[in-house]
Amino acid sequence: MKPEELKQELNQGMTRPVYLLYGDEPYLIQQYCRQITDLIITEDSFRDFNYYRTDKIEQEKIEQFLQTPPVFAEKKLLLFKDTGVFKNPKAADKDFLQTILADVPDYACIVFAEQTIDKKQKKLLALAETVECNQMTEAQLKTWITILVQRQKKKITVKTIEHLISCCGSAMFHLEHEINKLCSCTEEDVITTEQIDKIVVKSVENRIFDLSNAVLNQQNKTAFSILTDLKILRESPIKIIGFLSKSFCDIYKIKQCPNPTPQGTGLHPYVVKLHTATARKLSAQTLTSLISLAAECDTALKSSAVTDWTVLETCIAACLDVSKGASL
């Protein structure tokens, strides 16, 4: 089932016996879980009897919950969160789930909200209505942002939305938080880029994107200034080098693609749009050198006795040297 189909059914007040929600956009998974919960659990006073959430396969408790009819309600809800049973299940858990999912009582709804799954678990997957919740396309993201802003009686242009995404990235949790903050702090009816620059906090990913841009453009002072900011914010050096390495790898993928598209590269449309111009200007050799340096730094951070930040700063300096000879 596509997310759009699930949304339509839920808006019509319809639910199915078993759902499996998974994908790389946790915001959408949470929203659908909330919508299903609101449809089924309508009386807060009897929530404890009709709603059970768990991250474990506790067979006795689950059986007892499912065997008991709902209290003063039509249905009850069993929500599993990040159990891992659709990725690498224990044999006993797998057998148990196959049994209960094959015969769900009419009064029950079961929802699995999982980060990742293994599509080889065909027997389990066949027993659930699977919904893959991946990141939105750029067009979908723009529409969603427009709706969020309009709900708060504000307006925003497409150009301003693009600036907001360039600051926050495409993570919907972070975007929603910053949009709410913008709408609350802005007295005017229209959100502007100036207000975004004053109020919005850039995501860590975007700060590291700025760092990679500074490295690739040989902006030594800017690169180390951003690094200092990340250090003050107590970001993990391993996390920073991980994001930096991913940025270099993404640019390399785009470089290797004659006509870079989200489908051809396997990257999010927003990422392709951000990196395409840079990929055209850099040589494949420069990018492979930067990727190697990042990999060496990652290994050093995980094994060296030297201060983490010293290792990272040395890596950034080496990356700046590599990009120094590149034609941008």
Image: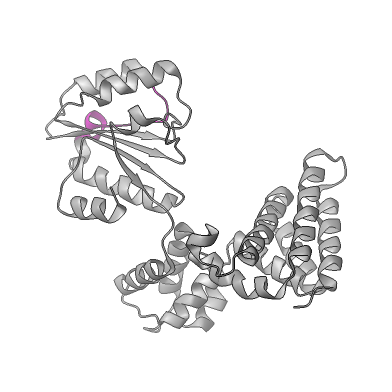
Range of the magenta residues? 46-58
280 in relation to 246, above or below = below
111 in relation to 218, above or below = above
Q: Quadrant of residue 177?
A: bottom left
Q: Position of residue 294 (x, y in %)?
A: 76, 54
Q: Position of residue 277 (x, y in %)?
A: 63, 76
Q: Viewer-proximal residue, 166 or 272?
A: 272
Q: Position of residue 50 (x, y in %)?
A: 22, 31
Q: Viewer-proximal residue, 252 or 138?
A: 252
Color encoding of the figure:
one colour
**Residue 57: within the magenta?**
yes
Q: Residue furthest front?
A: 258
Instruction: Judge left or right: residue 11 versus residue 210.
Output: left
Split into 4 quadrants, where in the image is the C terminus? bottom right
**Residue 49: within the magenta?**
yes
Q: Residue at x 86, y 57 (%)?
A: 314
Instruction: Judge left or right: residue 164 versus residue 142.
Output: right
Q: Viewer-proximal residue, 305 or 126?
A: 126
314 in relation to 108, above or below = below
Q: Position of residue 56 (x, y in %)?
A: 42, 25
Residue 200 visible within the image: no
Residue 214 visible within the image: yes
Q: Residue at x 60, y 72 (%)?
A: 276
